Amino acid sequence: MTKKKHLTQRQNDRIAGNQQKRLDRLAQKAAKADQQLEQAAFADAEPGVVISRFGQHADIEASDGTITRCNLRRTISSLVCGDAVVFRRTLQSQGTIDGVVEAVHERKSVLSRPDFYDGLKPVAANIDLLIIVSAVLPALSLNIIDRYLVAAETMQIKPLLLLNKIDLLSDSQRADVEQQLDIYRKIGYETLLLSAKSGEGMAQLDQYLSQGTSIFVGQSGVGKSSLLNNLMPEIAAVTQEVSDVSGLGQHTTTVARLYHLPQGGQLIDSPGIREFALWHLSDDEVSWGYREFRPWLGRCKFRDCKHGNDPGCALHHAVDTGDIAAERFDNYHKILLSMAQDKPAYL
């Protein structure tokens, strides 16, 4: 009987190594075949812009104006309306999905809002103008305006304060509103009084919108969808009156979408939100978000000044001298208080 020869450890290692090399070659060959198959299934890569996002899909507009609904690569962690992307169309229609988003370009700006469950959530990208829409009913809220302005300052997006439905104001009420808006004009913010019903201010709004990509933000029911209808009647966006019972509007837009305007420029219509939370910011970031505070920051008597009743507070001094509006200073403290109350327990 022939005695069975045992292999040395070195020989076993060599055999195992050769087998792994064969497996690696086969895997590479299979991957290359898959890549070739995919290349055959898709057209060449081309630039596009996200018109809207739906879960794991997005509508992408190409340079030729056509819109393709695409899947997203798993490597894409975030995609929002306004993003500039690279995508590829399928050569054969796959039903409702006819392309894939390959990559996302770096954003020049992004509007984000904090979500209680998801943390800081991007809403739209590459925005040139943040149009803060407010209405005269149930009342003009300077606190809401200040929240959006802090957000605009921290994200470095130019804001425009737009007061809608001014046709509902009497002469005396309009004078009061003008006085309130003067607070913002004095510190360099641009304002626009507008009525979609009478047409007042619409020509000026067209000029603002034609200069780039803008987004309407503001509480539900302030007339964002009505404005969009006026700008582009063919869209026929659903509008809804402010609730007579609660004074609060109902959500009329559920998904952000980018529209091309006939006079030039792009407009993103975003879902209405009743309150813009800022609990993701630090107290110092909120202070910096008040542009008229900046010359006074760091000039308080005590380094840990909370700008409340602290002695030697530079901001208090600026309020007394009229360099800071008392209304804005009051809203600043209200924002800080709401941040402490609204901040999730896990942070």
Image: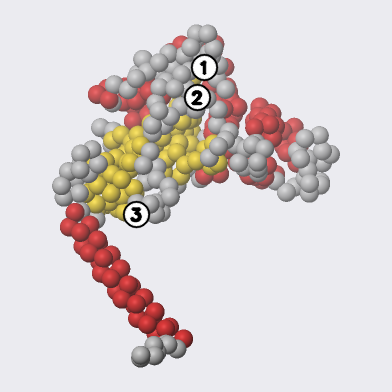
Q: Quick one: which residue is furthest to the front in this view?
A: 1
Of residue 265 and residue 274, the one placed in the foreground of this image is: 274
The quadrant of the image that shows the N terminus is bottom left
Of residue 247 and residue 194, the one placed in the foreground of this image is: 247
Q: Quadrant of residue 52?
A: top left
Q: Secondary structure at mark 1?
A: loop
For marks 3 and 1, give the CA distance: 40 Å
**Which residue is pictured at 82% across the width and 41% down the height?**
312
Q: Residue 80 placed where, x, y %?
A: 40, 42
Q: Quick one: which residue is furthest to the right in this view?
A: 311
The quadrant of the image that shows the C terminus is top right
| In the rendered image, the vertical position of residue 208 relative to residue 88, given as above or below | above
For marks 2 and 1, give the CA distance: 8 Å
C-beta proximity under 8 Å, tags 2 and 3 = no
Given this view, does label 3 or label 1 mark the residue nearer the observer? Answer: 3
C-beta proximity under 8 Å, tags 2 and 1 = yes
Name the N-terminal-most of marks 2 and 1.
Answer: 2
Name the N-terminal-most of marks 3 and 1.
Answer: 3
The amino acid beneath tag 2 is Gln
* Residue under numbered circle 2: 219
193 left or right of 56 in image:
right
**Which residue is pictured at 46% across the width and 14% down the height?**
242
Exactly how many numbered labels are in the figure?
Answer: 3
* Residue under numbered circle 1: 248
